Image (cartoon, rainbow, N blue to C red):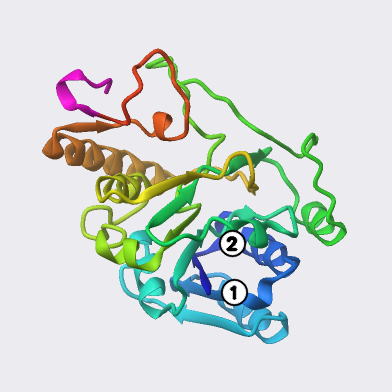
Amino acid sequence: MISIVTSTRNSFVQKKGSLELMLSGLRKQMNIEDYELIVVENSSEDESLGFLERFKRDAPLRNMKIIKNDIDVSNRSRSRNIACQEASGDFFLFIDDDIVLPDKYMLRKIGEFAKEGSFATGAARYWTYIHWKKEVLIQKIEREDWPKESQYYFLPRGIKRETGYRDLFEYSFIANFGLVDRSSFFNVGGFDERTFDGWGREDVDLMLRLYLNKTKFQLLFDDIWIIHLNHPLSESDAKQRSKSFQKYKKRESDLGIVFKVNHLYGVFENDGTAILEPLNEGIL
């Protein structure tokens, strides 16, 4: 069995109710009854908890757990680890509360990537435009109306101006949409909740440790596509992300390597072919 893991906090205040769209998309999946859904609710100050309880009551799910967390509520690594400790599946599928699965066969497809000793991510990540309306997208979910070319969302191919390299926003990372087998996840210690105690880079760090642990990687880009509900970045999240980036660079420095996620995804930009490079030879 695959356990779907989601962490949420104040979705209705900060993300226009993305949690409702995420779960509505899950409910449309053809084989959702074969999955376990675990949602960690991190003491939201909006209607998130009430919505989750209604969804659990009304949705056609055999297995759904709501874990109420009121400790260290901004630590997303910790809340995901809590969910995995409570999960009974052989595989964990991480889905952020602002991700929609547009294809009703998506869970069936992701099940084909569930292999022992492996992790899979890098789904094609389409982004909505910033001024999306929940009512419009709810209707699209109900009608199963998700063409690849749309006025509502796009597949970005942004460039980092400071380096000239792709920002890779067209790919998912393991925390917002990714699959890993249970034993591999716990063998590397799960998400590093002590170092990455806020938001940002906790997913790249987990992918780095899985790769160093010889866990086989599978790219989802050609088979799986998702929709990311775009939303403004809060000032606190922006500060957390900046701090997390510095912590992650220290992690690479301590290991003496550069982890080139772009090479893991098959994106080569005249920067060699190695996924891991000695730090003094890598591009920072």
Identify the mark at residue 35; answer none if there is no mark. 1
Residue at 33% across, 67% down: 183
Percent position of residue 134, x then y: 74, 55
User: What span is colored magenta in the figure?
Assistant: 277-284
Quadrant housing residue 231 = top right
- Measured along the vertical axis of the image, is residue 41 above or below residue 190? below
Q: Position of residue 147 (x, y in %)?
A: 81, 42
Q: Secondary structure at mark 2?
A: helix
259 left or right of 254? Answer: right
Residue 100 left/right relative to 84: right
Q: Amino acid at mark 2?
A: Gly
Within 10 Å of disc 1 (Cα), the crowding (few <14, some 14-19, many 20+) is some
178, 134: nearer the viewer: 178
Tell me the amino acid under the disc marked 1. Tyr
**Residue behind mark 2:** 111
Question: Residue 34 versus residue 166: which sits nearer the camera?
Answer: 34
Q: Quadrant of the C terminus?
A: top left
x, y percentage for residue 189? 25, 62
